[in-house]
């Protein structure tokens, strides 16, 4: 049995998978399964939407790097919006950009993830710009 919403009503009864097993002299010879109520009346409840930014937290001045998301929950399709210091800089599951700034500066990289069921999740990543950062961008 699994928990679901019936016709989108969270207070409704859960749907169940009813299974009949046919045995003959201790051996399985067949089975049937039926969703009660019908599958058309059962709607699964989506999981909570979440997102995390993956990518470097220390970069060199003017270094171009890519940041990615780990995400889950909600219902696809998703839409992503990337921001730096509250200005939109891109869309999509990843963002590639120039770190800009000089030694000692930093910026806030933020991603907003929206799912088609109306959920929204956000994550923020502070990126420091320093001359001593690795000469490559870790993934």
Image (cartoon, rainbow, N blue to C red):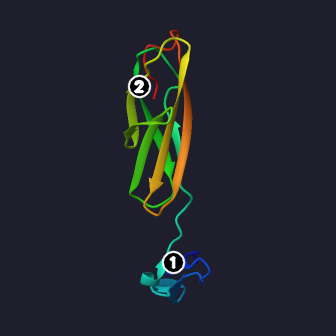
Q: Are marks 2 and 1 in contact (CB under 8 Å)?
A: no
Q: Residue at x 51, y 72 (%)?
A: 44
Q: How many marks?
A: 2
Q: Using the image as rendered, state which of residue 103 and residue 64 is in the foreground.
A: 103
Which numbered marker is on residue 8?
A: 1
- Which residue is at 55% across, 82% downward? 16
Mark 2 burial class by Cα count in 10 Å: few <14, some 14-19, many 20+: some
In the image, residue 41 above or below residue 66: below
| Vertical arrangement, residue 30 with respect to residue 50, above or below | below
22 and 127: which one is in front? 127
Say which residue appears at 44% left-offset and 21% top-offset. 99
Q: Which labelled disc corresponds to residue 35?
A: none
| Identity of the residue drawn at 37% across and 42% down | 91
Secondary structure, mark 2, is strand
Q: Is residue 98 left or right of residue 14?
A: left
Query: To which quarter of the image does residue 89 belong?
Result: top left
Q: Quadrant of residue 88?
A: top left
> Could one spot residue 30 in this view of the protein?
no
Could you tell me if residue 4 is visible in this image?
yes
Q: Residues within 10 Å of mark 1 (few under 14, many from 20)?
A: few
Which residue is label 2 attached to? 65
Residue 23 picture location, percent across and down: 51, 88
- Relative to the observer, which residue lies in front, 21 or 14? 14
* Sequence order check, earlier mark of 2 and 1: 1
| x then y, percent, for residue 12 | 59, 83
Which of the image's four quarters has the N terminus?
bottom right
User: Residue 53 at what x, y percent from top left?
Assistant: 51, 38
Q: Residue furthest right?
A: 11
For the C terminus, the image quarter is top left
């Amino acid at each position: 049995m699994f928990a679901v919403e019936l016709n989108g009503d969270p207070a409704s009864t859960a749907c169940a998978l009813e299974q009949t097993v046919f045995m003959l002299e201790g051996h399985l010879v067949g089975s049937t399964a039926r969703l009660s109520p019908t599958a058309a009346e059962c709607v699964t409840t989506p999981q909570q939407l979440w997102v995390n930014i993956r990518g470097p937290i220390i970069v060199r001045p003017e270094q171009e790097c890519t940041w990615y998301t780990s995400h889950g929950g909600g219902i696809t399709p998703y839409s992503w919006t990337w921001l730096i210091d509250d200005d939109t800089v891109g869309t999509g599951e990843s963002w590639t950009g120039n770190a800009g700034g000089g030694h000692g500066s930093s910026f806030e990289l933020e991603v907003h993830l929206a799912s088609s069921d109306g959920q929204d999740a956000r994550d923020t990543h502070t990126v420091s710009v320093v001359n001593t950062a690795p000469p490559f961008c870790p993934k």
